[in-house]
Image (cartoon, rainbow, N blue to C red):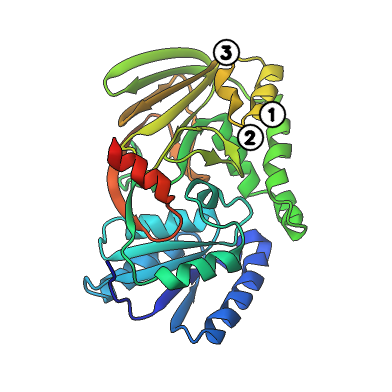
Amino acid sequence: MNEQTDQLICIVNPSAQNGGCLKIWRKLEEQLKAEDVSYIAYFTKEKNHAAELTKKIAEQKRGKPVLIAVVGGDGTIHEVMNGAVKYKNVKIAFIPGGSGNDFSKGFHVSSDAMTALKELLPIRNQKGTYVDIGVIYEKNNKEPNYFINNMGAGFDAEVAFEANHSPFKQLLNVFSLGKLAYVLILLKRLFTYQRTELHITIDGKRYQYTNVWFVAISNQPYYGGGMKIAPKASPLDGKLDITVVHHVSRLKLLFVFLTVFSGNHVHIKGVEIFKGKSIQLDSRSQLSVHADGEAAGNTPISVALLPRQVQVLNGINQKEKEEVRQC
């Protein structure tokens, strides 16, 4: 089914990939002009600007279908999705321009920006697929925080926070090696991080762990720049995948991260996987929390699945859609 959208609206994060995204956009813009595609581009200027732009665009359309193409990284798609979550007329498409681009991997979007654009243009008037997302409720924050890739509490959140604010990552982005920053900061924090006790409740069933490194709650398989933390996670299955890593030595945790890129970490003792729709996290000492790699407060928190909440146009694997229909 087709639905007419007046023009392609692009939200571009010129700061993504340490400014490399702006160069990507210039090439995409040339292609749009060459194909005589009507478009308008908005450039983000500060944190949460993409969410504000999305809300403004959605409201101006007064319920009419609008396609927003996100040109940036996982942080940019996170903000746009948070802005679009309450507007059913908004379709989101993604063109990778960041350093991690886990959304691309999990939603089957080409990792090459130009290819992603060329695949998007012929389908831009088609109806998208409504996908699941997650939402975080934090005691000290009145506003919920939505995530489309994953969220985490503990060690991984601290690594993500430091990586996002590291000048070293900016330097590596110059050489298209931004993902390496996560690995190097991970190695650094490996020797200083203090594990803690965690209480986790999944769909009413309570679990208690000691010596916990982190908990990751996933809507799709990838996080941290390509780590396959939840191999069976899907944004169409109506569930979130919960990964708990506990009672693992520092050396063994390193092995966990060496195997996580292939998804084989799930076979290691001390790595437990669950599926659920409603999760509560409470810890003896406060744990840092991230949502799609962005800082999202501290524990205690509640996390919930919101089924088929956001409309995504490009990427969703057709085979995956067929498998979900058959369930």
Whether 272 is drawn above or below 89: the answer is above
Quadrant showing the N terminus: bottom left
Residue 8 appears at what percent x and percent y?
Answer: 42, 76
Classify mark 1: residues with Cα within 10 Å, few (<14), some (14-19) or many (20+). Answer: some
Q: Residue at x 61, y 30 (%)?
A: 260
- Give the camera-side residue of 316 and 26: 316
Classify mark 2: residues with Cα within 10 Å, few (<14), some (14-19) or many (20+). Answer: some
Q: Is residue 169 left or right of residue 33?
A: right
Q: Secondary structure at mark 2?
A: loop
User: How far apart in space, not on screen, are marks 3 and 2 (Cα)?
Assistant: 17 Å
User: How far apart in space, not on screen, are marks 3 and 1 (Cα)?
Assistant: 15 Å
Q: Could you tell me if the residues under marks 1 and 2 are in contact, i.e. CB atoms within 8 Å?
A: yes
Residue 75 appears at what percent x and percent y?
Answer: 51, 54
Q: Which residue is mark 2?
A: 261
Give the amino acid at mark 2.
Answer: Phe
Q: Is residue 144 left or right of residue 213?
A: left
Can residue 273 be seen from the camera position used here? yes
Quadrant showing the C terminus: top left
Residue 230 appears at what percent x and percent y?
Answer: 50, 32
Q: Which residue is mark 3?
A: 269
Whether 256 is drawn above or below 22: the answer is above
Give the amino acid at mark 3.
Answer: Lys
Q: Is residue 116 left or right of residue 301?
A: right
Give the amino acid at mark 1.
Answer: Leu
